[in-house]
Amino acid sequence: MYKVIIVDDETSVRERLLSLINKIKESFEVIGVYENGYDALENGIPLNPDLIITDIKMPYVNGIELIKRAKLELPFVQSIIISGFDSFDYAKQAISLGVIGYISKPITFEELSETMEKAKIEIDNKLLLNTNIKDLQTNNDEAMRLIRDSNLSKLVTLKNAPKVFKEKLIQDEINLDYENILLGVFDNDEESEKITFEDTELVSYYLENYLRDELKEANFKYIVFRNGSDYNIFLLSNDHFDIEDIEARFSRIIIKMKKATKISLSIGFSDIGGGIESDTSFRKLYRHACRVLEYRTIIGSNIVLFYDDVDKGQSSTGKIDDNEFKSISYEIVYGKIDNAKDKIHQILNNITLDSFKSTYFFILNNLLDCLLKSCVNLKMLFNDYMPNVELIQKMVSLKTIDSVMSFFDDVVDTIDRINKVSRQTGVDNSFLQIKNYIENNYKNSTLSLKDVANELGFSVSYISAILKKNDVSFTKYLTKVRMEKAKVLLANEYYKIIMVANEVGYEDPYYFSHCFKKYTGISPLEYRNNEKKESLD
């Protein structure tokens, strides 16, 4: 069942559309009906519709602008335009937005049902809704794929690739000789134990198809490879990366993946490095991409995040390294504290055996070092919990295995609290920056999510995730700021309503009045009269 919203400023048209769609309701469900684009943006788009049916000429926000802004948040959404205007300019804009159909009023059942059937086919084609795993075959040479995956998986463990390894990459036709490289790490948002073999096969098939579809016209090359159970991707270019374009493409990919497979993925991108002949550490790029994914515990899942987003304001500290304790660090970093403790207890029980007598303290030191590398803010740990020297002294002074286990449990719990506080602080700081920018620029009538992203240096996806985490959308928060400022101005009779509208970012006073009434339940004039009456009382 596909979810539909209807947007038209004529009551009769909305009612007719609703009546006609109900006749083909086995495929479509109307989840919202709105009389203008503003209401649809504020209340309809958060419902995640599959299809928008909209008029073009509407007050406040027209149909073309509605579709443009909707696609920022829902890049997968389809649209049909209903219009009484036979305008080439409108039709041209509709085509550029990928509109399924352009229907002139009066609307007939035959034309609407035919266009909605086209919409259904288009949605199905984009989703590739075929879950028969036996049919999920690829045309790539599996042997070459395994060699490539093995080489690239090894590359991201190397701080500096030796010359002989670089030559091997060239022999295997892996070209990383580009000026700019981004490394992306895809990861399931579900716990790994919940992902079945069939799920993995579905992800494998759809991901490569969607990557091919979305990236075939991109201004960069890419290489996808399996790294254990995860998928990694190198983006390669001799020009500067268009981060906004990359974000939009990968947002569409993970949305399509969730629609087609019911599996939620996120992707974390590293900072930008140089090519294989530079001094770039591919291990560092990989660690940075993984670090970005840690922030899902704070801002949510099914998102695209960049290292630059989460690195602002964060201190640089030791991170996960590829060593024998990597799995414990992984569990702590991703908040799986009970798993980490179980693995630590297993190690501690093992090293009490006689065969470990000579290496007991060496292993303890490695274990402590492993825990410290999983802490995102060592300064806070050493200042607020215990200095590094005291940690070591206390550890070696313990005399029973129970006390050692208790010590490590306490360190793990402390690091987990610090990690959560540090990440939350970073996210809270970002939210504060976003709010401050909106509150300082609300007078700009064209203020958009892209404007905020460009000014603050964050990605649109990161800002949307931060706002969603705080139970607010960009449109709703901007409206709230404008309306609260309007209340203050309306209390002063010096400001005419048309002046108030202009002062809070509305060029159209009628649009302002509509928004104000939606927000407060009364018109600006009624609000002013009520305020005046209360002051006299």
Image (spheres, grey):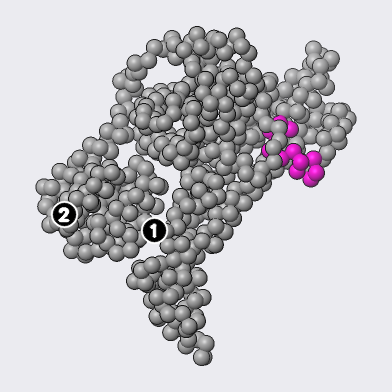
- Drawn side of residue 87 relative to residue 36, left or right: left
Q: Residue 47 at what x, y percent from top left? A: 37, 51
Q: Residue at x 75, y 26 (%)?
A: 367
Q: Residue at x 68, y 20 (%)?
A: 324
**Viewport quadrant of the N terminus:** top left
Disc assigned to residue 42? 1
Distance from disc 1 to disc 2, alpha carbons, whole Å, reads 28 Å
- Drawn side of residue 9 relative to residue 446, left or right: left
Reply above or below: 89 against 120: below
Q: Residue at x 80, y 44 (%)?
A: 383
Disc assigned to residue 225? none
Q: Residue 255 at what x, y percent from top left? A: 40, 38
Q: Around disc 2, counting alpha carbons within 10 Å, would you say few (fewer than 14), some (14 to 19), or many (20 or more)?
A: few
The kind of residue on which mark 2 rests is Asp
Disc assigned to residue 86? 2
- Drawn side of residue 52 relative to residue 148, left or right: left
Q: Secondary structure at mark 1?
A: helix
Q: Residue 351 at what x, y percent from top left? A: 77, 19
- Drawn side of residue 421 relative to residue 171, left or right: right
The kind of residue on which mark 1 rests is Glu
Q: Kindly report the secondary structure that dominates the magenta region of the rendered protein.
A: helix
Mark before the other along the chain sequence, 1 or 2? 1
Decide if residue 196 is in sight here: no
Residue at the far bottom in the pictured view: 536
Decide if residue 452 is in sight here: yes
Residue at the far front in the pictured view: 239
Image: magenta residue range: 372-384
